[in-house]
Amino acid sequence: MQDVIQRAKAIRSVIFDVDGVLTDGSLFLGDDGQEYKAFHSRDGLGMVMLQQSGVHLAVITGRESQVVRLRMQSLGVEHVYQGCRDKLPAYENLKQVLDLPDAAIAYVGDDVVDLPVLKRAGLAIGVADAHPLVCEHVDWLTTAPGGRGAAREVCELILHAQGRLDALWRTYLDPKISC
C-alpha cells in the first residue's frame, strides 16, 4: 500500500472509464432509444473535491451518450472523450493537452478494453468488481464496486496521499474554516 500512496502523491490527473466504473455497468434503454445510466452522488462529490484540490479529471469511454456529457458537465469535468473503442489515442491526447507524464496520471478501469491505458498510467486502479485480468494488472483495487462508491474511494485515496483530505473534512465539520 505504501507504493500506492507514493504513486498517488504524484497524480495531477485522474481518468475514469464510465460504464462499470462511474456506473455499475448496467445500460438502460427506453423504447424510444433513450439511454439511462445511474451515477452515485458520493462519487460525484468526490470528483468535485478532487478537482477543487487542483487535480484534472477526465473520462474516456467506448460508448457515446448524451447522459454522460450532461453528468460530466454538471461535475465540471472538462475532458470528456466518448466513442473511444481504442482508448490509448485519447489518453495520449490528454497527456499532450495537460503536458503530463504517465507518472502524473491515474486511470480507473474495470474491463479488458482498459488494459492498454492501465498499463501506461502512473497509477493503475481497478474497481472491486473488475474483470479478473484487470485485477492482475492494477496497482490498487477499490473495495467498492463500480458505480457504488469506487470513484469516491479513488478521490479520497489521492487527496489523502497528497495531504489534503483532513483539511477538506475540517471544512465540513467546521464551516468557518475554508480550504
Image: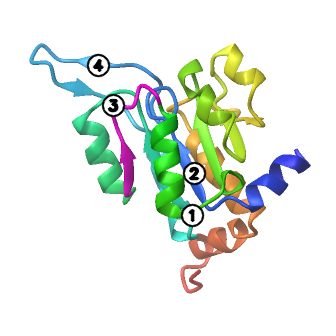
Under mark 4, the amino acid is: Phe
Front: mark 4 or 3: 3
Under mark 2, the amino acid is: Val
Marks 3 & 2, CB-CB < 8 Å contact: no
- Residue at the spot 88% in from the left edge and 48% down from the top edge: 3
**Which percent across, then down, holds residue 53?**
58, 70
Asked whether the viewer can see residue 46, the reply is no
Q: Is residue 5 positioned above or below 34 on the image?
A: below
Q: Nearer the viewer, residue 5 or 167?
A: 5
User: Which badge, 2 or 4, comes first in the chain's sequence?
Assistant: 2
Q: Which residue is mark 1?
A: 55
Asked whether the viewer can see residue 150, the reply is yes
Q: Which residue is mark 3?
A: 83
**Which quadrant of the structure image shows residue 54?**
bottom right
Q: Which residue is mark 4?
A: 28
Magenta region's main secondary structure? loop
User: Which badge, 4 or 3, comes first in the chain's sequence?
Assistant: 4
**Residue 85 located left or right of residue 20:** left
Q: CA distance from mark 3 to mark 2?
A: 19 Å
Q: CA distance from mark 4 to mark 3?
A: 18 Å
Judge the density around disc 3: few (<14), some (14-19), many (≥20) Cα neighbours within 10 Å.
Answer: few
Marks 2 & 1, CB-CB < 8 Å contact: yes
Q: Residue furthest right?
A: 2
Q: Which residues are magenta?
A: 78-86
